[in-house]
């Protein structure tokens, strides 16, 4: 049975570094979680929700520390975050940072971060879209701490939540009480952090529009979700777009993510009177239009993101697609 291609997330190297600092070796964690032994040294490894949960249950078991998720998050340097998540720390203010973090999760992970504002409160809560089991306490602590760390590190202020809801059972550790410095309810039906809405307007002194221009392309286009009923050609294009953002839209990698061999994928594409090359061109064309629609994206940067060797190659391809140059299309739209 083929896995849902949307149930996938990349585990950053920052996780393994944080685990090592806690005295937890990668091989030991993977043995405990019954995951592939080389996962910690595989740069392009993907995890399903079930794999991710198994890894965090291994962390809980081997550390025997109820606050291990908090410790690993607090002691992780912002500089080792992936570029897409790092962009949240260079946002305009806390609200902008939260929205960037939620956007990253929506496009690149099977975890959804919902942000609602009402009255004087802002409620932020995560949800795993394809999980069949409860999220491990340590993993939930990581998400809640990441939300708060974003505000504290971004603003440079000791932001305190109004309250925190947790599905974990009590009692809480002293580190939980000291870290959140707010009322915490355990045994809730949902993990959530409730913030003072006024804190969302606090500016980030490190706001860097120029750096965000560099970091944002990987999130610039709405890549959508791959549903089981999505035609194969559309599934391939979605996965090509995701890989274009990292510069490697290779047919073998796309085939692997779809759970089939490269030869099988090529044959099934041919059965639809298409080729991988034509789908790559279509994906570039569609993503190019979406990126050009955003005035903040420069044409040279878009050419680089789409994998062209230079701007001239992008101009020639785009004129063949649309009948006008990228600059003319940008002016019209």
Image: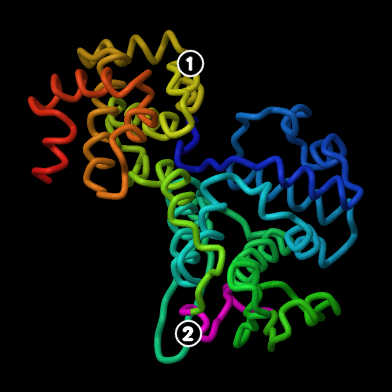
Say whether residue 288 is left or right of residue 211.
left
175 above or below 15? Answer: below
Q: Where are the magenta residues, as a range? A: 187-201
Q: Quadrant of residue 134?
A: bottom right
Q: Position of residue 86 (x, y in %)?
A: 57, 52
Q: Earlier in the sequence, mark 1 or mark 2?
A: 2
Q: Quadrant of residue 242?
A: top left
Q: Return the mark for residue 252.
A: 1
Q: Nearer the viewer, mark 1 or mark 2?
A: 2
199 above or below 306? Answer: below
Q: Categorize mark 2 by other alpha carbons within 10 Å: few (<14), some (14-19), many (20+).
A: some
Q: Which residue is painted at 28% across and 25% down in the image? A: 233
Say whether residue 69 is left or right of residue 229.
right
Say whether residue 75 is left or right of residue 319.
right
85 and 314: which one is in front? 314
Q: Position of residue 13 (x, y in %)?
A: 70, 40
Q: Secondary structure at mark 2?
A: helix
Q: Which residue is painted at 48% across and 86% down in the image? A: 198
Q: Position of residue 65 (x, y in %)?
A: 88, 63
In this figure, what is the number of numbered marks? 2
232 above or below 86? Answer: above
120 and 306: which one is in front? 306
């Amino acid at each position: 049975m083929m896995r849902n291609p949307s149930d996938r997330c990349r585990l950053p190297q920052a996780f393994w570094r944080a685990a090592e600092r806690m005295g937890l070796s990668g091989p030991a964690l993977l043995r405990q979680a019954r995951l592939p032994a080389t996962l910690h040294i595989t740069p392009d490894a993907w995890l399903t929700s079930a794999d991710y949960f198994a890894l965090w249950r291994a962390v809980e078991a081997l550390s025997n520390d109820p606050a291990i998720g908090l410790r690993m998050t607090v002691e992780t340097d912002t500089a080792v975050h992936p570029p897409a998540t790092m962009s949240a720390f260079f946002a305009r203010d806390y609200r902008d940072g939260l929205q960037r973090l939620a956007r990253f999760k929506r496009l690149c992970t099977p975890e959804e971060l919902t942000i609602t504002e009402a009255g004087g409160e802002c409620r932020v809560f995560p949800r795993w879209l394809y999980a069949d089991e409860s999220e491990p306490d340590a993993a939930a602590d990581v998400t809640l701490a990441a939300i708060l760390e974003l505000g504290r590190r971004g603003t440079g202020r000791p932001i305190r939540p109004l309250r925190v809801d947790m599905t974990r059972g009590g009692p809480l550790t002293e580190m939980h009480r000291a870290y959140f410095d707010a009322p915490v309810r355990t045994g809730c039906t949902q993990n959530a952090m409730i913030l003072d809405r006024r804190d969302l307007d606090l500016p980030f002194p490190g706001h860097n529009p120029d750096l965000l221009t560099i970091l944002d392309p990987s999130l610039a286009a709405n890549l959508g979700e791959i549903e089981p009923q999505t035609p194969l050609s559309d599934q391939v294009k979605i996965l090509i777009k995701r890989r274009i953002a990292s510069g490697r839209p290779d047919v073998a990698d796309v085939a692997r993510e779809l759970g089939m061999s490269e030869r099988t994928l090529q044959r099934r594409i041919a059965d639809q009177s298409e080729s991988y090359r034509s789908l790559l061109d279509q994906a570039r064309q569609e993503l190019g239009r979406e990126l050009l629609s955003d005035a903040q994206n420069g044409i040279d940067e878009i050419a680089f993101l789409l994998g062209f060797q230079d701007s001239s190659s992008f101009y020639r391809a785009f004129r063949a697609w649309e009948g006008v140059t990228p600059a003319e299309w940008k002016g019209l739209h």
